[in-house]
Amino acid sequence: MASLKGKNLIVPGDKSITHRAYFFGAFSQGKSRIINPSTALDCQSTIECLSKLGLGFEFSEGKVFLTCDGINSLVTPDSTLFAGNSGTTLRLMMGLLAGRPFSATIDGDESLRRRPLKRISDPLRQMGADFDLSNEHTAPVTVHGNSLEGQFFELEHASAQVQTAIILAGLQAEGETSCVVPNKVRNHTLNMLKHLDIPARSSSPLQLGVFGLKSPIAPFEIVVPGDISSAAYFLVAAALLAGSQVSIDNLGIDTGRVLVLDVLARMGANIEITNKRLASQEPVATVSLTHQNRLDGITINARDLASGIDELPILALAGALCKGKFEVRGASELRHKESDRLSLLVENLKNAGVKIESHGDNFEIDGADSVPGGTLWKTAGDHRIAMTGMIANLLFERPVEIDDTDCIAISYPDFSADLAAMFI
Ligand code: S3P
């Protein structure tokens, strides 16, 4: 078997942080600079939607310049805002538009039209906005913006998207808006509020609150760190392929995103984190992984899932090849991503010869020292399932046939080329 080698690797800018930089740009007056933005199609969807609302975007190598004249300069779009495949674009847009004095419709592709929106529309309705949704509470959604009143929310779901939509509405509301999530989520919204000098209250890691802004924020510069969700594919592959050694520079290691590192370390992987620092209030570091022994089985509990929900598909491959049992408990949110990732994972891995069983929202893998493969790998157009299939092809005895790899551009357009460059 070949191995993965790469020193000083760089993965694309973080998708979550890039979306937030563009959305917060809607509150600014002047020209801001976003350095190392994500190249993902999802972030392109955010740019297209914000452009229709009147924001200006200019592009140069590794940078995006964003121009806005304050939140009150946003205009009624002349057509439907199309969020493509991007749940973050759709949900954050609902929060942004909730406080605007006009109505606008947001739609997306077939997958986006299946994603639950009641978790967003319910709190935003309580603040004063209104929404027309399908009978299943999905897109297309028409947002009827209104003047908003600050509210306190205790959220049912540990969702950074819901939290951020509420914060974007809260910045336009009268008084204070605050929400508490049931488990830890990514901290990018809090980090960005700090970086932009917007007063925010976070009395515990689960709570975040803001006050309505009285004036536009100053133009800003944000340096986006590498996306740990993209790096996860290389880290897991290196942990499983003998002789591998990778080091990834400038990688975002927010505590709400590091499940993949924690899980690999608990499984016995040799991970080193050096050169820790803050970039635009985001913790970044060089993360190195040197292949050591076969990984051990572990259990991942529900309360930890939000800090790596997008990495569970690739982590399941580590489970398939571990020594012992790999269990994931309470992964109901996996069913509501770009696809029902829980069902697809179980189906694909079972077909490939992995001993995997699911009971409700839990799954359990009996690790083996090899996986036969040679089967069909269904993606349902889900980029993370497709990239997991590509890594499976380095690990299984026979390659799987991935039914769609074009969807990978949704988060990581250069994934195949970057992977090929380090596979020797
Ligand atoms: C994201 C939050 C997560 C994640 C998504 C990006 C974000 O979704 O799965 O890919 O940028 O806030 P939820 O917050 O709905 O869990």
Image: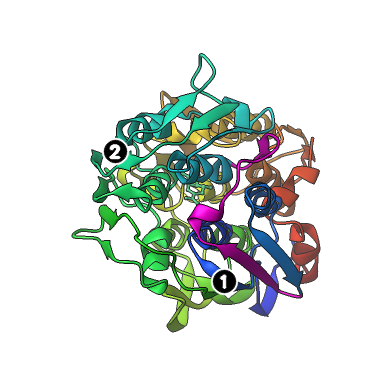
Residue 155 numbered tag = 2
- Ligand 1 within 8 Å, label 2 CB: no
- Per the image, is 85 magenta? yes
* 142, above or below 42, in the image: above
* 378, above or below 5, in the image: above
- Per the image, is 238 magenta? no
Q: Is residue 274 left or right of residue 4?
A: left
Which residues are drawn in magenta? 61-86
Can residue 350 be seen in the rendering of this structure? no
Which residue type does callout 1 highlight?
Answer: Gly
Q: Residue at x 47, y 30 (%)?
A: 117
Residue at the disc numbered 1: 30
Q: Is residue 11 left or right of residue 300?
A: right
* 5, above or below 326, in the image: below
Secondary element at tag 2: loop
Which quarter of the image is occupied by the C terminus? bottom right
Q: Quadrant of residue 371?
A: top right
Which quarter of the image is occupied by the N terminus? bottom right
